[in-house]
Image (cartoon, helix red, strand yellow):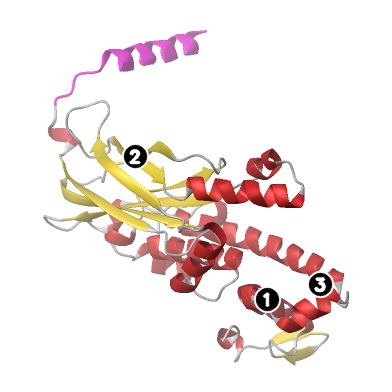
Amino acid sequence: QIYVFLKDETFEFEGKKLSALEHPGLRRNLCHIAGRINSIALNSHPDLLEAASEQKLDQTYFKASMEFRQRCGILLEATLRTALGFRNYPLAKTIVETVGIFKIGTKSPDEIEWFGGVMQKQYGTLPRIEIENTTLENPKEKEMATGDILVISTDLTRVHAEAFTRQKIAMCQKQGIPPQVALQTYREGWWYFVRAERLDGTTPASALPISTESGILSQVDKADTERFQTAKFEERLLTAWPMIVQNVAQKSGKVKIQFKAPPEPGKYKFTINVKSQDFLGADQEFSVEADIVDSETLDRKPKEEDTKEKEEDEGKKDK
């Protein structure tokens, strides 16, 4: 199933037209992909374990496999940048899921039950986060208006922090590795995706423009660009924020995400999707509603700090 989308394609190689499986380079890459997404099953297969004990494994395979994973990681990062540039939530969501299954070594993000069993066996718990006390506000004004910078704040708890820390330390002690070394190299990635849905009318997708004149988006085919340009407003991202946990023992913290309010007034439901790029079944979704008023109807007086900043900027220009 990995190469179904390539089955009718042909590729040039040494003056010949070859299928994907006939092309040496493509066949090699497809084998690497098949091995990676089935790595959990392969690494525990009796034949592989027996071969390893008898030192019959080709060590260059593991080196080549690691290099392949690194190259795929670079490509996935570029693809995610493209999705974020197009402000497209469905594509960004799929790419983060792909990063996850590629890291874990499984074929589908739906393998939640299997992954949960692995986590329970290894750590005695499931990797989960709890999100509480969510608020949405404009830090500088009492109302929220079109174009304002808004802030979503939440209290975050990593339920698995203590169990993961205990297990990591135990593994280090068993292998004779200083615990601080393993703890310092820990990485746990989460993405916060923020979208909006108009509840009292319709906001066109064009209200959130996509710039394709420069950068990576300028290299995308015109047909693909047009497809993303016509995506629904509800599928467009207001912002995407990555959170990297570097301390496995960190149990709780406060998350603040800034984004610009929709450019058209109305009543909106803001949906925040939290997706893990390391765990299956750990994603979260929550929402808050708010009225966004038309900024042109407001008579706002300049804040003292804004006036001071403006004066300082003008002073720098004079110098």
What's under tag 2, amino acid-wise? Asp
Q: CA distance from mark 1 to mark 3?
A: 17 Å
Q: Position of residue 47 (x, y in %)?
A: 76, 84
- The residue that appears at 87% across and 77% down in the rendered structure is 54
Can you say whether 315 is above or below 53 in the image?
above
In the image, residue 317 lies in the stretch drawn in magenta: yes
Foreground mark, 2 or 1? 1
Circles 1 and 3 in contact, beta carbons < 8 Å: no
Compare residues 36 and 3 and report the one nearer the observer: 36
Q: Which residue is mark 3?
A: 61
Q: Earlier in the sequence, mark 2 or mark 1?
A: 1
Q: Is there CB contact under 8 Å for labels 2 and 1?
A: no
Which residue, given by chain and number where applicable, does mark 1 sit on?
Answer: 44
Mark 2 lies on residue:
155
The region drawn magenta spans 299-319
Amino acid tagged 3 = Tyr
Camera-side residue: 173 or 24? 173
Q: Is residue 230 left or right of residue 7?
A: left
Residue 114 left/right relative to 57 = left
The quarter holding residue 90 reads bottom left
Neighbor class of circle 1 (other Cα within 10 Å; few <14, some 14-19, many 20+) is: few
Q: Which comes before the other along the chain, label 2 or label 3?
A: 3
| Of marks 1 and 3, the one in the foreground | 1
User: Is residue 217 visible to the viewer in this orientation of the structure?
Assistant: no
Report the Cα–Cα distance between label 2 and label 1. 39 Å
- Name the residue: 39% across, 44% down: 157
